[in-house]
Image: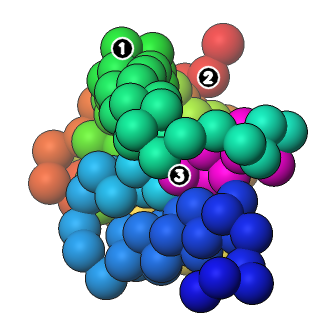
Amino acid sequence: MPGLAMHYLWWILALVLIAGEMLVPGYFLLWIGIASGAMGVVLFAAPDMGVLTQAILFGVFTFASCFAYWKWLRPRLERGEPSASLLNRRGEQLVGQHLVLVEPIVNGRGKARVGDGVWLVSGPELPAGIEVEVVSVSGSLLQVRPAA
């Protein structure tokens, strides 16, 4: 493609790699695509750069972007996992929440409103309408105590 500026080729490669990332699991192609886009920016600023210099600089950019992901971004993303570990365990997400009893706790069992639903609760004998705090979960049974 003799009429096409070289920086456009780097940007096209970046788009192809980033689009390929959507088809392949993981984050590997994304960082190579970012390096390719950076090469396009550098080549736009310095259009007379030789092909060997471009290849070496692309390798440096690729290594730098992959290293930046591995060293700084990945640990920050993994720090968020504890909250994600409760994603499908809604009962455990309720620990510490304050709920209102819709049925009194009699013989250790009652019901409390959670959002637009009602959950079975266990705790000391309390009348309906009292605010309680969830202290633990056993299956789908919430263990509660009177809220302070």
- Disc 3 vs disc 2: which is toward the camera? 3
* Residue 82, label in figure: none
Q: Quadrant of residue 69?
A: top left
Q: Is residue 36 magenta?
A: yes
Earlier sequence position, callout 1 versus callout 2: 1
Q: Nearer the viewer, mark 1 or mark 2?
A: 1
Numbered mark located on residue 147 in the image: 2
Classify 131 as above or below 139.
Answer: above
Report which residue position mark 3 lands on. 36
* Residue 127 visible here: no
Q: Earlier in the sequence, mark 1 or mark 3?
A: 3
Which part of the image, by quadrant, shows the N terminus?
A: bottom right
Question: Of the residues shown, which amino acid type is indicated by label 2?
Answer: Ala
Q: What secondary structure predominates along the stretch shown in magenta?
A: helix
Q: Nearer the viewer, residue 5 or 26?
A: 5
Nearer mark to the viewer, of 1 and 3: 3
Q: On residue 71, which mark appears?
A: 1
Badge 2 element? loop
* Residues at marks 1 and 2, CA–CA distance in whole angstroms: 44 Å
Mark 3 is surrounded, within 10 Å at the Cα level, by few (under 14), some (14 to 19) or many (20 or more) other residues, namely many
Q: Residue at x 24, y 74 (%)?
A: 24
Q: Position of residue 63 (x, y in %)?
A: 34, 27
| Neighbourhood count class around disc 2 (C-alpha, 10 Å): few under 14, some 14–19, many 20 upward | some
> Residue drawn 34% across and 58% down?
29
Residue 2, given in percent of the width and then of the height, sits at 65, 82
In reply to whether residue 6 is colored magenta, the answer given is no
Using the rendered view, name the quadrant where residue 92 is placed: top left
Category of crowding for the residue at label 1, using alpha-carbon neighbours closer than 10 angstroms: few (below 14), some (14–19), many (at least 20): few
Is 37 situated left or right of 14 in this image?
A: right
Q: Tell me the magenta residue range.
A: 35-44
Query: Would residue 6 be visible to someone looking at this image?
Result: yes
Which quarter of the figure is the C terminus placed in?
top right
